[in-house]
Image (cartoon, rainbow, N blue to C red):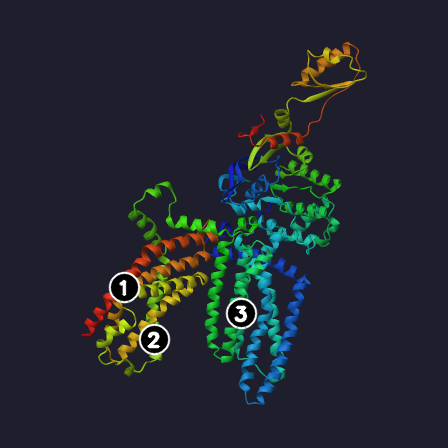
Amino acid sequence: MATMVTIPEKTHPGPSRWWAVVHWNLSRALIVTRREVIDMFRDWRIIAPIILLTIIFPFIANWGAGRMVSWVTQYGAEVVGERLIPFLLMVVGFFPISFSLIIALESFVGEKERHSLEPLLSSPLTNLQLYIGKTLSSTMPPFLGSLLGITVYLVGVYFNVGWIPPFTLLVQVILLTIVHALVMVSGAVVISTQATSVRAANLLASFIIIPMSFLIQAEALIMFWAQYNVLWWLLLGMVLVNVVLVRMGTRIFNREHLLGREIDELNLIASLRRWWKLTLARRRPEDQRRSALRWYRDEVLAAVWRMRGGVLVAAAGMLASYFIGVRYADIFRIPPEAFVVDDWYTRFASLLVDAGLHGLQGVLLVLYQNVRVLFLASAFGVFTFGVLTVLILMLPIALVGYLTSQMAVAGMNPALLVAALLPHSVIEIPAAIIAGAAAIRLGASVIAPPPGKTVGEGWLTALADATRVWWCLVLPLLLIAAVVEVFLTPTVLLWIAGG
Amino acid sequence: MIETVGLTKHFDEFVAVQDVTLSVQPGEVLALLGPNGAGKTTTVRMLTSILEPTSGEAHVAGFNVATQRDEVRARVGVLTENHGLYLRMKGHEYLRFYGELYGIGQEVSARRAHDLAGRFGLADALGRRLGEYSKGMRQKLALVRAMMHDPPVLLLDEPTSAMDPHSARQVRDAIHGLRGDGRTIILCTHNLPEAEELADRIAIISRGRIIARGTPLELKARLLGPPLLELRLGEPLNGLAENIKDLVDVDSQGHNWLRFRAADPGQTNPAILRRLAEQGIPVVTLSEVPRSLEQVYLRVVSESGAPQPVEAK
């Protein structure tokens, strides 16, 4: 009776199945894309600005570039003009792309407000097909406008000042345009699936606009600096960000929440209560009868086990950073004479007193410093999916690698540095790794909440785990490390130094 | 067909649907009635695999709504409460789009769109933008959309809302036709006469629970008591009530009429007519006083604090 959609897993066994599935998903996504693009071209409020920006702005940029080159040449500052032209190429490509953000922001929540979303969600379209379809429809028209704008600009600049971009630069600008669009659209689609109104989505768009504006300014600096190789690293970073955002978007896409949520409510008191309950981990009546040791094993050590992925990432990052430090020691050398300090060990004890690193005061100072760094690293990690946490953890280890290598080159005994660090590091580094893992898991919980949980629920669960691990493992370890660092490490160092 | 067993849906602490057990066979129309916020839309969304049940099970066209979502959606046609049309699209474009989503080829899609639109008087309007359609036309086109892929199951939410009587008649006739084709239909409506006309069975839902179910006749008999009959004479009663009190209990009376309840009209009415004929009393009419589904509904919903659902046997 009914005409059914055939699913290729059932019709294409064997190796051809993968391609059949990709083709099937893409072809069905393109049904949505086609409809949206045609609909877009029927809305003059979208098309008119894209056309204006695509055609008129490149002329303005071209005219401005020509005038600037003439003016700066009078003062022998041709380099300003030379750098401005490629920079304007990038700007001309970016402006039409900025529309993709607006289109993507209302891709889901706009349909919900117009009540056209439920029939779409009731169709056999899968979540992935719907997601890809909407993403492509938000990206393609602005991207085509951007290419047209770049073409108009290049033709104008060629006839005006005779400039032809190097092929590599042109490829970089086009790729940057694509990834700009994809990053903004991926982020906007995530917002659109989570917001309850177009107004809320537009307000949340600042989470995309502000980082993108910083990024554009960074790219502008690079263009004026003419260090175009750095653009490849930027491209790589943005591709990774896009992968994360797409994964996050597909993972948290939920038809039920999309249709069901009408009002945004942030009940802080209820959230705090929930967080506290999760931290104490009293899920069932029998949990309240557990011994402290049992609770510690079940809820603290088990939480560390759950973070094992983050532990591996943090540990691998820190290990890699040691060798990065060693590598940079070859590039940025410290003169060997800077390492020679006569009789340093006679003044060592007074140096410690001067720095406040003695007695209980010293312990508290070291503890405060370590807790502050790890806490800030964790806090930054929340907003960067854990990336900044890893980078901050890597810095001191990179420094150790750098100094160790420099000391070896200067003919000093690197064991001195090891002795200065090892006694407390064997406790401090695992604490840092665990704290880093907790932050990575907290950041990752936003990208991929556990199945069946919303982003908020997954985040609260990860926060509760992080709280437990901090109070019951990280802080005690840091305290012990601080005691060792103040009372034991100086003794070991002096003993090694023969003082 | 549609089978649900203990279907339940919680939204955090709020229980939207609790323990709903339904069975709708092919060729049957079930009308799902209930006040606003009773759980009708939530139930329908679970049956279209948009919402995942918190507990319980539901099978639509032989597929599990929780584990075989794509299969369920391919076999269900949904008319949502809001028509949800893309107003900048033309009618035929819109239907072709949904035809593609449901895997229908362009030729078949165009033919089916034309046939279905023609059934509702929309064939000439397919070339116009949906933004130019009246409310009733949009509703009809949304119904055509729900039927484009020839689904064995139809879930219709207020199919005749915003329609003029002629259009509403067309839609009701179409639903009769769909039932005749062996489709399984759930109809959510506040239009009780429509429900009574179209539905084979009624389920009344309130605060997430089914509180009454059965055929319209069964529900009336169970909840409103035996049928109320009215006897009209060609002359004043002249003590007729006393005359027939051995046969029936008179409920009310007037100058030349009286009303009575009869548990078994097939036995009672002939006896009354015989006696009146023997006495030469002219009878104008003996007929059942119409009882509406509205009376059933209002009675059931006002008593919906009752712990047990009222089952019509």
Report the Cα–Cα distance between label 1 and label 3: 47 Å
- Reply above or below: A84 against A127: below
Nearest to N terminus: mark 2 or mark 3: 3
The residue most toward the right is: B235
Report the Cα–Cα distance between label 2 and label 3: 33 Å
Type of amino acid at the residue the image marks with label 2: Arg
**Residue B22, horizontal then vertical, whole percent:** 55, 35
Numbered circle sitting on residue A360: 1
- Reply above or below: B71 against A416: above
Task: Report the chain holding disc 2.
Answer: A
Task: Report the chain holding disc 1.
Answer: A
Numbered circle sitting on residue A47: none
Between marks 1 and 3 in the image, the one whose residue lies nearer the viewer:
1
Quadrant of image for the C terminus of chain A: bottom left
Nearest to N terminus: mark 1 or mark 3: 3
Q: Secondary structure at mark 3?
A: helix
Q: Which residue is mark 2?
A: A327
Tell me the residue at 59%/62% (across/down): A138
Q: Which residue is mark 3?
A: A213
Seen in the image, is B125 located left or right of residue A214?
Answer: right
Between marks 1 and 2 in the image, the one whose residue lies nearer the viewer:
1
- Reply above or below: A459 against A238: above
Q: Secondary structure at mark 2?
A: helix
**Residue A241, horizontal then vertical, whole percent:** 47, 64
